[in-house]
Amino acid sequence: MIFTLGINHHSAPLAIRERVAFHAESLPLALSHLVDAKPVKEAAILSTCNRMELYCATETPEVAVDWLAEYHQVERSHLQPYLYTYPQPEAVRHAFRVASGLDSMVIGEPQILGQMKDAVRVAEEAGTLGTMLHKMFQRSFAVAKEVRSTTAIGANIVSMAAAGVHLAERIFESVADQRVLFIGAGEMIELCAAHFCAQKPRQVTVANRTIERGQALAERYGGQAIRLDELGEHLAHHDIIVSCTASPLPIIGLGMVERAVKARRHRPMFMVDLAVPRDIEIEVGELDDVFLYTVDDLAQVVDRGLESRQAAVVQAEAIIAARVENFLSWLEARDSVPLIRSLRDAAERMRRHEIEHALKLMAKGEPPEKVLEHLSHRLINKFLHSPTQAINLAQGAERSELQAAASRLFHLHSGD
């Protein structure tokens, strides 16, 4: 049975996600430990800045939860409120949605597909990926490709962060050549960092009241952290400023930006203020060489992409639902393989035994027609003996179930 447990940006804050994250270099050993020490047949771990998910094939899912808590030395009771667990049908659907970008912080973003492929490669190299998970992930990748090629899931802007990047690209030829300053370290700034840093900017800086939290976010993108009271001396060194704090008053005033513009020799500054109330004084937008956008400005960009993206999401979900059904049917058929093989083996033994018996009769001079007639009767009697006996000995509901099964298996109809 395929089973998934995880923790992500929807279910847990960063402080909890950090405690169960796996470093890339530790993944092979962790996978081997899980499969060797627990009754888990197959396993793969997807660990990114926004999620940690364990996909496994096991008949005892609870051991995976215990292992995760034990591995990270965290009390299970501390993790339990933030964990989501999916049995087989939901686990397959979740994998398909993750690969297609429908479960991402940025809907439709393509990075997660590459991260999932990396997770599968690591599991393959560690020897913990078997037939079931291998097939599920390959189907996930195929579904993601189908979703991207037949819907507009990644074509339109539907988040403030995506809108911010879109507007920045109107000012600068390439975000990759710019220095970006994020002010704050909350969920919205995390989302913006994911979008802007996907463009691989030249420099990333995070300014936050709590320097430790700022460092945690900055380190994810190879950046540096500063304190909020250092903004004045650092502002001029950045081309793109994205701010979203809980400050009741503006933290970037007109005078601070005027000095920064002068120090930059009037090179343009792109500023996004996503805070409510505002982080940046409204007068800043009147300065030459400063392009200031508020949350309302970005909302207008987002609204233009929502309708078509929502239609794409609906289309994507329909594709995924159909592909999940196909895959679950494959799993069910796979479960029947041992029984079918056993049935065929038994029939083959009967056939060989009766052929040997018929050859002996022909060797004694029995007419071929008589031998073939005898052979066919004996084969039919042997094939039908067990099912006939089971129906005759059954009673009540069991007999009705066996009769219905026999009718279906042998394509019988009333009156036949």
Image (spheres, rainbow, N blue to C red):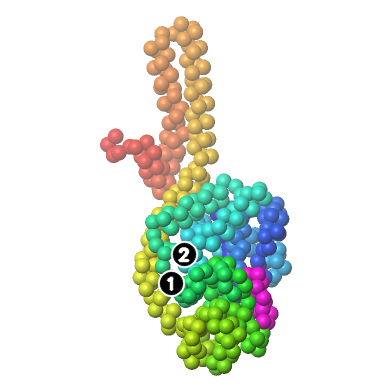
| Quarter containing the C terminus | top left
Specify whether 255 is left or right of 407. Answer: right
Please tell me whether residue 173 is drawn above or below residue 234 in the rendered image: above
Residue at the spot of label 1: 158
Q: In the picture, residue 75 is in which quadrant?
A: bottom right
Look at label 1 and name its amino acid: Val
Q: In whole angstroms, how far apart are the C-alphas of marks 1 and 2?
A: 9 Å
- Residue 256 locus on image (x, y percent): 58, 90
**Label number found at residue 108:** 2
Q: Residue at x 65, y 86 (%)?
A: 233
Q: Can the viewer see residue 289? A: yes
- Count of numbered badges drawn on the protein: 2
Can residue 403 be seen here? The reply is no
- Image height of 270 relative to 365, above or below: below
The secondary element bearing badge 1 is classed as loop
Magenta stretch prevailing secondary structure: helix
Kind of residue at disc 2: Gly
Residue 389: % across, % down: 45, 35
Q: Earlier in the sequence, mark 1 or mark 2?
A: 2
Residue drawn 51% across and 12% down? Answer: 360
Magenta-tinted stretch: 211-226
> In the image, residue 234 lies at what x, y percent?
64, 83
Q: Residues within 10 Å of mark 1 (few under 14, many from 20)?
A: many
**Residue 338 belongs to magenta span:** no
Asked whether residue 217 is drawn in magenta, I would say: yes
- In the image, 128 versus 315, the foreground residue is 315
**Residue at (42, 34) in percent of width and height:** 388
- Circle 2: element type: loop
